[in-house]
Image (cartoon, helix red, strand yellow):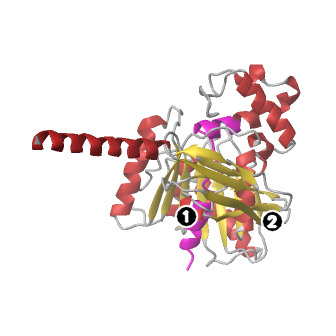
Amino acid sequence: MCTARNNMKRLLYSGILFVLLVATANAQFSVTVNSGYGSGRYKGSGRSIHIWAEASPANMVFDRWIGDTQVLIDPTAWHTRLSPKLKNANLTATFKPAPAWTPITNQVNGSEYRYYFPPNARGVVFRFHGTGGSGSTFFNRVEDRISANNFVAAGFAVVALDSQNRIDKQWDNTNNPPNNVDINNVQAIINFFIAQGLMTAATPVFSTGMSNGGAFSPRVAYALQFKAAAIYCVRGGTYINITNVPTIWNIAQNDSNENVGPSGNADSLTFFRILSARGITAEHNTHIASPLYPQRFARISGLTPADSQIIFDALKTNNFLDRENYLRQSPATSNWQTVIPIVYTPFYNAIRSQLDVSWADHEYFADNDGQTIAFFNAQIP
């Protein structure tokens, strides 16, 4: 009799525990996003919950989220996720002034470069393009220009130059100074800035690069002793056993580039751990896939929120998005162009870049600007 009663108690407690677990798994909470996107009621299970700031108003850049920011992975990122802390949250995207600016074009040893110095620049950021690119991409591609604006608004000068090799349009990731023309060009540009009074020999200098430029970033940073290097979408193992340059990796989850891919992403994490174990300041971030939202394409210059809605609807109604608005297939193979109204043909490249960023493929993304800027700031005495 006692055994039966105990069994009933165990069943009762198990039943209560089961109900509590189900209730927890299905508990709903609300997220309110002001001046941005991602509002709704969510369950405490399933995929990550993403929020985005609206496209920056004219002469403004995203600053940070305010409100219940303890639930956010990164309050300084225009696009971020909620942490596993399940609770109602009210969040507001805030923006700060960023006066309009235009880069100056110049040449060094026959290679073109562009630059802009805000008043009283706190540091200089060199940006290195990927294979097939040029320095101009930092100032005219969607995500790149947003990053350039963010760096300038944070008080940094920005510089982007062409690789000396204009056939493959790649950086010299083989030779060391003084036999590396690309590194020599960077030094010549710094010397020019000093001669012009734009900076001094003591001004902190940083490097950031995408893909092939990401591999070059730690190379030039080590050779010229920059304050820090940022690496996007590449392994980034250059001089990993000897460099003393603080380094931040920003890796794409679904990088499909033949020189990166899953093995390259794994290598980047190994290199980060090696550098950290050597006592050198390092950070490793992985940009994960995110759903589309109707105003995603309003980030593209020349497209309005109404245009973005039309593009989004074309993808949604033609089954390119799943129930939670994640892309069902890589933009490289999905033939998404076939459903976009022909009036948007001039914007196909920019639309593709936004799709690639959402898919977390081999594409530069501005999502980690807050973390990269904070990393660079931390290296300034």
- Give the residue at mark 1: 70
Compared with residue 235, is residue 94 higher up or lower down, i.e. above or below? below
Indicate the position of residue 196 as horizontal and vertical percent values. 77, 74
Q: CA distance from mark 2 to mark 1?
A: 27 Å
Indicate the position of residue 201 as horizontal and vertical percent values. 63, 77
Indicate the position of residue 144 as horizontal and vertical percent values. 71, 50
* Quadrant of image for the C terminus: bottom right
What residue is shown at x 74% (from left), y 66% (from top)?
153
Compared with residue 177, is residue 2 higher up or lower down, i.e. above or below? above
What residue is shown at x 50% (from left), y 39% (from top)?
46
* Quadrant of image for the N terminus: top left
- Give the residue at mark 2: 98
Q: Residues within 10 Å of mark 1 (few under 14, many from 20)?
A: few
Residue 90 figure quarter: bottom right
Q: Residues within 10 Å of mark 2 (few under 14, many from 20)?
A: some
For badge 1, the amino acid type reads Gln
Q: Is residue 317 left or right of residue 30?
A: right
Q: Are marks 2 and 1 in contact (CB under 8 Å)?
A: no
Report whether residue 111 is seen.
no
Q: Is residue 286 left or right of residue 266?
A: right
What residue is shown at x 60% (from left), y 55% (from top)?
368
Magenta stretch? Answer: 353-381
Tag 2 secondary structure: loop
Residue 373 within the segment the image draws in magenta: yes
Q: In the depicted view, which residue is nearer to us: 372 or 325? A: 325
What residue is shown at x 65% (from left), y 28% (from top)?
321
